[in-house]
């Protein structure tokens, strides 16, 4: 299955999508029940609040080969900042209207990271930190 990933524009600068991509690669979390190989066709953002461009961008990914759309956990679960998009439900409706009823939509990508005692030591949503 070829997948197009839509991320939150406001969190993309603090998260390189490492956990989204890992969940897809390993068929974990939202992708656990997916059959066959998963291939990432493209990654884009919602276009910024309130996500009005998400439908257009999802349709564009279908034209470029995507067979399914995944809404990243930064939109629906609030990773990495513990703040889900207040427009997530409407954004999902807009995407559904743009792609039709037959296109699978994953409503998240991965579970939020487990909290650590110290935020400075936490790996966040995107995997372990690299030391300089």
Image (cartoon, rainbow, N blue to C red):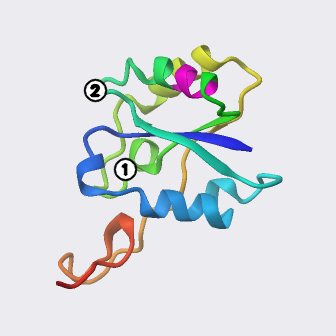
* Horizontal arrangement in the rendering, residue 124 relative to residue 94 (left or right): left
**Residue 84, position in %: x, y?**
36, 44
**Residue 41, position in %: x, y?**
59, 41
* Horizontal arrangement in the rendering, residue 30 relative to residue 48 (left or right): right
Q: Residue at x 35, y 57 (%)?
A: 16
Measure how far apart labels 2 and 1 are at the Cα level: 14 Å
Residue 59 in magenta? yes
Residue located beneath label 2 in the image: 49
- Labels 2 and 1: the sequence-earlier one: 2
Residue located beneath label 1 in the image: 78
Q: Residue at x 32, y 76 (%)?
A: 123
Neighbour tally class for label 2: few under 14, some 14-19, many 20 plus, Cα within 10 Å: some
Q: Which residues are magenta?
A: 58-62
* Horizontal arrangement in the rendering, residue 99 relative to residue 54 (left or right): right
Label disc, if present, on residue 53 of the rendered structure = none
Tell me which corner region of the image, top left, top right, bottom left or bottom right, holds residue 124. Answer: bottom left
Tell me which corner region of the image, top left, top right, bottom left or bottom right, holds residue 53. Answer: top left
Marks 2/1 in contact by CB < 8 Å: the verdict is: no
Farthest residue, direction right: 35
Q: Is residue 102 above or below residue 113?
A: above
């Amino acid at each position: 299955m070829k997948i197009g990933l839509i991320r939150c524009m406001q969190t993309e600068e603090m998260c390189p999508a490492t956990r989204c991509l890992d969940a897809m690669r390993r068929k974990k979390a939202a992708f656990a029940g997916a059959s066959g190989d998963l291939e990432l066709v493209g990654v884009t953002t919602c276009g910024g609040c309130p996500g009005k461009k998400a439908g257009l961008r999802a349709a564009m990914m279908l034209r470029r080969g995507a067979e399914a759309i995944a809404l990243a956990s930064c939109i629906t679960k609030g990773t990495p900042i513990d703040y889900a998009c207040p427009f997530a439900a409407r954004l999902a409706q807009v995407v559904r209207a743009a792609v039709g009823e037959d296109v699978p939509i994953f409503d998240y990508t991965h579970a939020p990271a487990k909290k650590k005692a110290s935020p400075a030591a936490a790996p966040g949503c995107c995997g372990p930190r690299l030391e300089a």
